[in-house]
Amino acid sequence: MSSRRTISTARRVLAQLRHDPRTIALLLVVPAMLMTLLSWILDDANWQRYAPGLLGIFPMLVMFLVTSVATLRERTGGTLERLLSMPMSKADFVFGYALAFGVIAAVQGIIVGGLCFTVLGLSMQGPTSLVLMVAVLDGLLGTAMGLFVSAFAQTEFQAVQFMPVALLPQFLLCGLIVPTDQLPSILRFISALLPLTYAFAAMQKLAQNATVASEFWVDVVVLIGMAAGLLAAGTATLRRRTA
Amino acid sequence: MNAPAVEIAHLVVDRRGVNALNDVTLDIAAGRITGLLGPSGSGKSTLMRAIVGVQIATSGAITVLGLPAGRPELRARVGYVTQAPSVYRDLSVRENLTYFQTILGAEASDVDRVLEQADLTSVHKRLVKTLSGGQESRVSLATALLGSPELLILDEPTVGLDPVLRRDLWALFQSLADSGLTLLVSSHVMDEASRCHDLVLMRDGQLLAQGTNSDLLARTSTSDIESAFLYLVDGSAA
């Protein structure tokens, strides 16, 4: 692995996005628009209850979609094969993507968080910097999942269809709709295996507690561990040699 | 005579249950242009992929520049251009080349050199997706010229090019060979045979014949490679 190759890959991914202003607009504007809509339809108590969790879920959703389509393009367009026939490690490729989309997730987090905390009147007890950190981690988790599932898609059409398969069950079980401790025991067990559960729990703790307890850091560590595991699994799906 | 750049012994490749290459044994001479000729589906691309090391072989051995094919040390020494241009269509020509140049660890000045060699200097700022098909495939070719490859594997590089560009490209290949590079160039157009120093004829995953243009014509008592090919398939001159 080399930092030069990782960084130039991240810069290349960002350059591709720069040539595609419509995608940038969608990445940055859509989550802000959805949060605005949500604040409009909910009364204040419900807004304060649901918004923190969604603040963590939107980056994951968007990054999942962008990464799965982008890496699928690399796989089918021959550029991945070309890169891997050069002196480039798979980790350079994966971390390059993670770095580029991490930057996008951070900008997205700043925009959406800024909007929620000012105009939309969301109040979270915990430090804003940690809210942003969790949002970026969620974006990276989405990147990791997108990279992994792109190995199982043959077309961009299929890749997009994987989004409901991979994310909607997590959305239902993460605790946003029904708190995890009220789920039937088997679902509670499944919920504990899903990364979004920890993303949601971390945001929820930041919303409710002014002091950051060790339970929060447990959520963060599990989240990082799961994202790293998925990135490693995604790396393993890249093949230098094919049949 | 130098050691061959590529030595292939009894190569067998099965792809999804289909036999793509069947017991191919072949040497590719260093510092020369070898033309790999055969109809589409004859196994040319599979053979090239195997030499680059991205194709899993069922059995047999391939030695490239003295090392087993696919070894990490070879990645900066072998340039490979696939049939479909594998470059980023949503980046400019220069952005593509600069990115691959960084990955290869080549000199920054290399980008201008290959732009010149592939006759792309005038379009270097344009996005690849706005280029013509021929220009796009030359971006892919220019990428393979970055750094200092010793062996270039070019899969149908001249398809769809106008005759002037085709002539210029063959002149470029000749000058690269003169500077010591080994080139393996595939084509399904038999009339490109005369541009190559050595020829390899393939059909149905098998090696039909190998030799210089004049060798093959003399051996088959024919006057062009298309007839020689038919002679070798049918056992009689067409």
Image (cartoon, coloured by chain):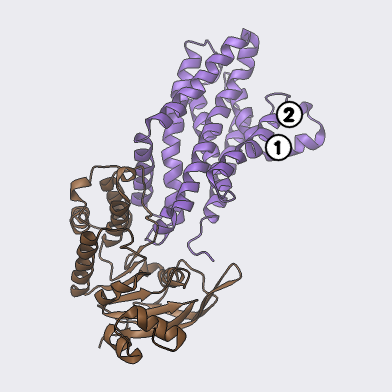
Q: Is the Cβ of the residue at disc 1 closer than 8 Å to that at disc 2?
A: yes
Q: Position of residue B13 (x, y in %)?
A: 53, 74
Can you tell which chain is drawn purple? A
Res A180 visible: yes
Q: Residue drawn 43% across and 68% down?
A: B45
Secondary structure type for disc 1: helix
Dot label at residue A192: 1
Read off the chain for label 1: A
Residue A216 lies left or right of residue A133; in this view the side is right
Read off the chain for label 2: A
Dot label at residue B30: none
Q: Residue drawn 64% across and 39% down?
A: A166
Residue B126 lies left or right of residue B75; in this view the side is left
Labels 1 and 2 within one chain: yes
Dot label at residue A180: 2
Quarter occupied by residue B28:
bottom left
Q: Which of A178/A150 is in front? A: A150
Q: Which of B77/A1 is in front? A: B77
Which amino acid type is marked by label 2?
Thr
